[in-house]
Amino acid sequence: MKHEERIEFAKKYAKKLYAKYKDGLIYFGITGSTYRNEDRDDSDIDAFVVTKDKKHWPESKWLHFMYNGIAVSIGYYTVEELDGTISKPDYKWSHRVFRVIKSLPIYEKYDLIGKYEKAIRKINQQAFNKAASKQLTAAASCLSGIRRNAESGDLAGTRSGATLATTSLDEVVAFLNKGFLPGGGYGSPNLKLIAKYKKIPKDYIRLNTTIWESNDPEEINNAAIELISNTISFAKRNGVEIPKYNSLAKIPV
C-alpha cells in the first residue's frame, strides 16, 4: 500500500469514527512510519483515537485488524486518561508521549498536540527527577544478569540484559532534558535524538553504541557497567536521588 493510500484510508476511517462518536471524538492521528513518511508498501499502520469518554468504545482498548493485506493497530484513549499520562512522567511515559506528540492529525476537534506540548513544558523538573530515579534503579538491577551471562560467554543474554538497561537509561537522559523518545524505546532512533540533547552523560553515545554493535560479551558487560555508572553520576549532578535503605522498617510498602 502506497503512502497516499494509507492517508486516504485514514481519512475515510476518520469519517467512520465521527459517525460513531459525533462530538465525542476529539482526535484521530497516524503515528509511526506513516507519520514520518518512511512507510514501505508492507509497513503496518499505527494510529490512535481520543474520545471524550468510553461510550461506544470497542471491547478492547486496542483494535488490531488487516486492511488490504496491511496490519493496522489503533489505540483508544479518553481525554482524561491522556491528560493524566502526559502530565505525570513515569514508566513508558516517553514512549507514550512520543506516540501522541509525533502524530499526524487526521481529525482534531481542537489543537490537542499544542495543548500537550504546553503541558510538558509546565512539568516541574522534580517530577522528571523522580521518574528518572525509578529508571536508574531498574537499570542497575540488570547488572548481575549482564555479568552472569558475560562470564558464561552468552552473547545474546549479555546483549539482552544490557539492552534492557539502556532502555531505562535512555529514559533517564530524556527525563533530564524534558524530552521524549520514539516507540520501541531503544537503539539507534533513541541515540539520534539523545545526541541533540544539551545534557548527556559522559561517553553516552559511544558506550551505548558498543552495546549494540560489539560481539564480545565481556566488552558489552564493561560498556554497560560504565554506562550505568556514568548515567548515575550525571543524574546525581542534576538533582536526582536514588533511595537507599539500611533498615527494613524504613522501606516503603
Image: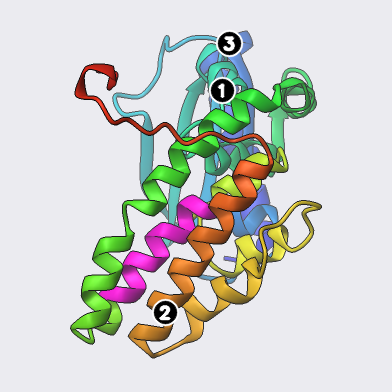
Q: Which numbered disc covers residue 24? A: 3
Q: Position of residue 219 (x, y in %)?
A: 42, 84
Residue type (three-letter) at the residue carrying disc 2:
Ile
Residue type (three-letter) at the residue carrying disc 3:
Gly
Above or below — where is 215 with respect to 201?
below
* Mark 1 vs 2, N-terminal side: 1
Residue identifier under label 2: 220
- Based on the picture, tell me whether residue 163 belongs to the magenta stretch: yes
Foreground mark, 1 or 3?
Answer: 1
- Residue neighbourhood size for the residue with mark 1, other residues' Cα within 10 Å, grouped as few (<14), some (14–19), many (≥20): some
Please indicate whether residue 88 sits to the left or right of residue 143 in the image: right
Residue 31 visible, this angle:
no
Dots 1 and 3: beta carbons under 8 Å?
A: no
Q: Position of residue 15 (x, y in %)?
A: 61, 29
Residue identifier under label 1: 88
Please indicate whether residue 213 sits to the left or right of residue 163 in the image: right
The CA distance from mark 1 to mark 2 is: 33 Å
Q: Nearer the viewer, residue 150 or 174?
A: 150
Residue depicted at 78% across the width and 27% down the height: 121
Its colouring scheme is rainbow
**Element under disc 2:** helix
Q: Nearer the viewer, residue 199 or 63?
A: 199
Foreground mark, 2 or 3?
Answer: 2
Residue depicted at 46% across the width and 46% down the height: 136
Please indicate whether residue 176 sits to the left or right of residue 157 in the image: right
- Residue neighbourhood size for the residue with mark 3, other residues' Cα within 10 Å, grouped as few (<14), some (14–19), many (≥20): some
**Element under disc 3:** helix
- From which residue to which does the magenta span run? 157-170
Quarter of the picture containing the C terminus is: top left
Asked which quadrant contains residue 132, the reply is top right
